[in-house]
Image: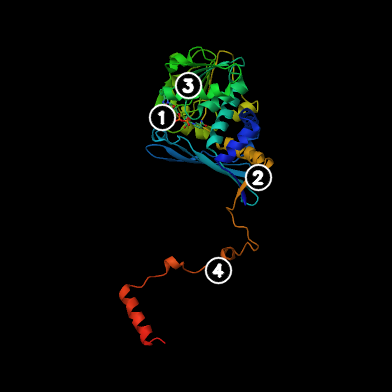
Amino acid sequence: MIDYIGTERIRALIRDIGITTFVEQLAEEIQADYRRWSEFERSPRHASHSSVGVIELMPASDGRFYSFKYVNGHPKNTAEGLLTVTAFGVLAEVASGYPLLLSELTYTTALRTAAMSALAARWMANPDSCVMALIGNGAQSEFQAIAFHHLLGIRELRLFDVDPAASAKLEDNLEGLQLEGLRITRCRSAAEAARGADIITTATADKRNAVILTPDMIEPGMHLNAIGGDCPGKTELHVDILRRPDARIVVEFEAQSRIEGEIQQLEPDFPVIEFADVVAGRALGRGCTREITIFDSVGFALEDFSALRYLHRLHRASQGRSELDLIPHLRNPKDLFGGLMPAIPMQSMEDEPQLPAERLQDSDRKVSSGELA
Ligand SMILES: NC(=O)c1ccc[n+]([C@@H]2O[C@H](COP(=O)([O-])OP(=O)(O)OC[C@H]3O[C@@H](n4cnc5c(N)ncnc54)[C@H](O)[C@@H]3O)[C@@H](O)[C@H]2O)c1
């Protein structure tokens, strides 16, 4: 039996612990794992692209545990009543190779992305940041808003989406939560949302080199949390923002971000900083108050590894645990076949060859005449 977390179970776990505690503890878990960066086997994710989206596999291992996530990104899906991003994943132990947990990761991806965004902003944004523009108000947006309110102290959110219904949904959901001291303003353009913000989060979905932010929208000291540009040919920032001499770009895993991040628009040797160097104190997340800091987020497998380990502990420690009989449990592990016993017929009744009607009549005749007796 392996542990199983489906959508019902993740709802119950989040309800029990509270979403802010969940995000806070997950951010701590992610930070602790980035601090032991060198212990991880790292590789860019394996991406299978189509004209409408991408399906990706994201593996990570620290030598004791191994994890992978299956995730898709299909920006056109919402028009058909489907999510843009869905995911599930597995945590396994390296010693035996046995899976320990199969989990939903659709909610968890939104939570871990929000935790990671807020964590990066803690290291990179000016400490007195309290106004955030949130551009792209779809599935990820509430999670971003909650994490930045709770972990960064954001007190004003300025929303913009090309789909006004998405912003209305975000505003309704946040108002329902009654987050302490949070003021919400809906804006008519990305430029209006960005004006006067300390932090800009872009979480749009469009499979093209979109230009959500242009250089004229950027003010001294801003922190940009760019999460929607995460595939080749799918970006959100005008390249001149990245090229500003006062810009500092931090990425998760450079080899993957060169392919998928905003920095795919730059030369391969354009200087960037890995987040692991920031949390280890080898590099600064911000050099001075007026610098533009850019977290060029694409999502790295280590964050899902952290999330799966965190979820596994939470799942095991709380009531209502469910399991799946995914792997055979055998008395003799060399007798895999025996696990199918007793009594499997070589052919199912349905598979037995049917005799053609004439042959049937023929054999009936023979039997009835006693020729086969
Ligand atoms: N970096 C990461 O770790 C990470 C993790 C999860 C998702 N993502 C990415 O985040 C993005 C958002 O994901 P989601 O699940 O919220 O998608 P979604 O489809 O639910 O929401 C995207 C929103 O962006 C809006 N939008 C599209 N173009 C816009 C524009 N030009 N200006 C303003 N708004 C625009 C859409 O109307 C929609 O409401 C996706 O691109 C996804 O791939 C990144």
Crowd band around label 3 with a 10 angstrom C-alpha radius: few (<14), some (14–19), many (20+) = many
Q: How is the image coloured?
A: rainbow
Residue at the spot 61% in from the left edge and 37% down from the top edge: 12
Residue on which disc 3 sits: 242
The reply to whether callout 4 and callout 3 are in contact (CB within 8 Å) is no
Q: CA distance from mark 2 to mark 3?
A: 38 Å
Instruction: Please name which of the two marks, 2 or 1, marks the residue nearer to the observer.
Output: 1
State which tag comes first along the sequence, 4 or 3: 3
Looking at the rendered structure, the kind of residue marked 4 is Ala
Residue denoted by label 1: 206
Q: Which residue lies under the disc numbered 4?
A: 343
In the image, what residue type sits under mark 2?
Arg
Q: Amino acid at mark 3?
A: Leu
Residue highlighted by disc 2: 64
Dot 2 crowding, Cα within 10 Å, few <14, some 14–19, many 20+: few
Any part of residue 114 in sight: yes
35 vs 216: above or below? below
Residues at discs 2 and 1 in contact (Cβ within 8 Å): no
Q: Nearer the viewer, mark 4 or mark 3?
A: 4
